[in-house]
Amino acid sequence: MLWVKAFHIVFVASWFAGLFYLPRIFVNLVMETDATATRRLLLMGAKLYRFMTLLAVPAVGLGVWLWMGYHIGQGPGNGWMHAKLFCVVLALGYHHACGSILKKFIAGKNTRSHVWYRYFNEMPVFILTAVVILVVVKPF
């Protein structure tokens, strides 16, 4: 089970690296005025999103394996796991939102400012912080 846990952590960290970086590409896309640079950023964003999705699948799959293997979340004192699973759902929703935003950029239909994307870019930091605190501290 320790191998599963180790690879779960690696895939989660790798997935979140993409969740941190793709919205930064969105900031750059909004601010970019050169068409060649815009095309390059769109290509980078599309490739990153595909790779992030490939990383998210084993991250979630290995997490489910751990959850089932350790029977976590059963009985009293495991409220932290329910909160963590809620954060995982938030991370998956954020991932999906990034894909929707990328499609809007590709279609040339972005309506948001670089400031909005700068705030949007911070959301995975809060999600990951909450997950780490919940898993390590197990506050409830």
Image (cartoon, rainbow, N blue to C red):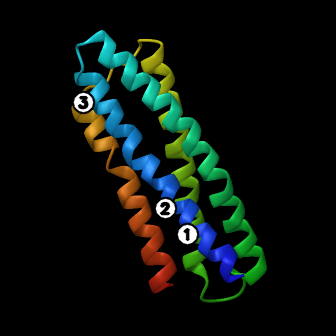
Q: Is label 3 in contact with label 1 (beta carbons under 8 Å)?
A: no
Residue positioned 67% across, 67% down in the render:
63
Type of amino acid under label 1? Ile
Q: Is residue 58 above or below residue 80?
A: above
Q: Give the camera-side residue of 137 and 28.
A: 28
Q: Give the camera-side residue of 107 and 38.
A: 38
Q: Is residue 16 visible?
A: yes
Q: Sort mark 3 into few (<14), some (14-19) or many (20+) by Cα contacts within 10 Å.
A: some
Name the residue beneath numbered marker 3: 114
Type of amino acid under label 2? Ala
Residue positioned 22% across, 14% down in the render:
33
Type of amino acid under label 3? His
In this picture, residue 44 sits left or right of residue 7: left
In this picture, residue 37 sits left or right of residue 62: left
Name the residue beneath numbered marker 2: 13
Q: Is label 2 in contact with label 3 (beta carbons under 8 Å)?
A: no
Residue 77, position as x, y percentages in the image: 60, 89
Q: Is label 1 in contact with label 2 (beta carbons under 8 Å)?
A: yes
Identify the image quadrant of the N terminus: bottom right
Q: Earlier in the sequence, mark 3 or mark 1?
A: 1
Residue 36, position as x, y percentages in the image: 32, 13
Name the residue beneath numbered marker 1: 9
Q: CA distance from mark 2 to mark 3?
A: 26 Å
Q: Sort mark 2 into few (<14), some (14-19) or many (20+) by Cα contacts within 10 Å.
A: some
Residue positioned 34% across, 42% down in the render:
120
Is label 1 in a helix, a strand or a loop?
helix
Is label 3 in a helix, a strand or a loop?
helix
Residue 69, position as x, y percentages in the image: 77, 79
Residue 117, position as x, y percentages in the image: 30, 35
Q: Earlier in the sequence, mark 2 or mark 3?
A: 2
Quadrant of res 79: bottom right
